[in-house]
Amino acid sequence: MIPGLISYYLWIKALHVISLIAWMAGMFYLPRLYVYHCQVESGSSESERFKIMERRLLRAIINPAMIATALFGILLVLTPGVINWSAGWWHVKLLALAGLFAFHGFCSRWRRLFAEDRNTHSEKFYRMANEIPTVLMMIIVIMVIVRPF
């Protein structure tokens, strides 16, 4: 715990939420780009355009937003009185967060496969994958706001 963080709690919390919104926006959009990318022929100008869009979205928005979210989240955890370490909601939230980090990793891998024209997944696969960050976000928000247990 770092007692000096108490004075900055609301700012840290606001920056955490702002960076989370940016991260989630990217995580909602990237799999949707993959759906559209599946609909075009590999090597076409459209495919090359999708590769650029996917790379820029991941590197310029999603990755920095994820890092900022994690850093501000760690600062919140280190703020005295914010977390009751024995509360069950906290553990569920961390599990869902681990799932979100894993999904981020999968999205990065899929982007590399598209970049190398080696995608093996279908449009339907990416449509289904597009729902994963929504479910994880819902779990995280409910755990943090409602704190059901």
Image: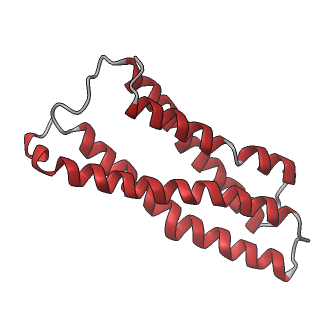
Q: Is 33 situated above or below 71?
A: below
| Residue at point 51%, 71% (across, down) | 60
Quadrant position of the N terminus in the picture: top left
Task: Say if 138 sits above or below 119 in the image.
Answer: above
The image shows a total of numbered marks equal to 0
| Residue 121 locus on image (x, y percent) | 84, 51
The reply, left or right, for residue 32 in relation to residue 136 is right
Query: Quarter of the image containing the C terminus?
Result: top left
**Residue 47 position within the rendered picture, expressed as x and y whole percent measured from the top left:** 81, 74
Q: Residue at x 73, y 59 (%)?
A: 32
66 or 8, nearer to the observer: 8
Image coords of residue 77 (percent x, y)? 26, 37
> What's the residue at 15%, 34% (across, down)?
80
Q: Farthest residue in the bottom direction? A: 45
Q: Nearer the viewer, residue 145 or 32?
A: 145
Q: Is 76 on the left or on the right of 7, as rendered?
A: right
Give the quadrant of residue 83.
top left
Q: Is residue 75 above or below residue 135?
A: below
